[in-house]
Amino acid sequence: MGAGDIGYITGAFVTALLLPVLIFVASNFIPAAKRNRGVLYGICGLLAIATPFLAVTGGGSIIDAAVAAALAGALIWWGYTRAVKKAQALTARRP
């Protein structure tokens, strides 16, 4: 793994998260999106995983794209579990 591969993985990871982050920010103002976290995180997870593979035709390797997609998917999954735990904690506090 050379410096080019690390740069490609980093760039693909950041690019893969760009659209999902914009969707998360926009959905913050939509009450239905707040209620259906699973659907929102599912769509954003698919976008984050698919984006690095779309850039493979631009000169990257499939292994680098798979690493970037795995990192992006893991970050979306971590955000989903964090959001679910936060929602459960808020509902547990209410009488």
Image: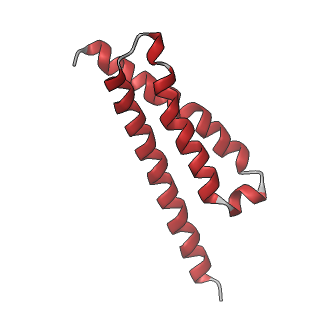
Q: Is residue 71 left or right of residue 15?
A: left
Q: Residue 32 in the image: x percent, y percent?
A: 76, 59
Above or below for 50 versus 86 = above
Q: Is residue 94 left or right of residue 49?
A: right
Residue at 47% from the left image edge and 11% from the top image edge: 58
Question: In the picture, which quadrant includes the C terminus?
Answer: bottom right
Q: Residue 94 in the image: x percent, y percent?
A: 64, 83
Query: Which residue is more in the foreground, 54 or 23?
Result: 54
**Residue at the left extreme, as displayed:** 1
Q: Quadrant of the rendered structure where residue 73 is?
A: top left
Q: Is residue 12 left or right of residue 47?
A: left
Q: Quadrant of the rendered structure where residue 11 is?
A: top left
Q: Residue 47 in the image: x percent, y percent?
A: 56, 37
Q: Residue 82 in the image: x percent, y percent?
A: 49, 60
How many numbered marks have been drawn onto this rendered protein structure? 0
Above or below for 57 versus 44 = above
Residue at 77% from the left image edge and 59% from the top image edge: 31
Residue at 59% from the left image edge and 82% from the top image edge: 93
Question: In the picture, which quadrant includes the N terminus?
Answer: top left
**Residue at the bottom extreme, as displayed:** 95
Residue at 52% from the left image edge and 28% from the top image edge: 51
Query: Which residue is more in the foreground, 56 or 24?
Result: 56
Coloration of the structure image? secondary structure
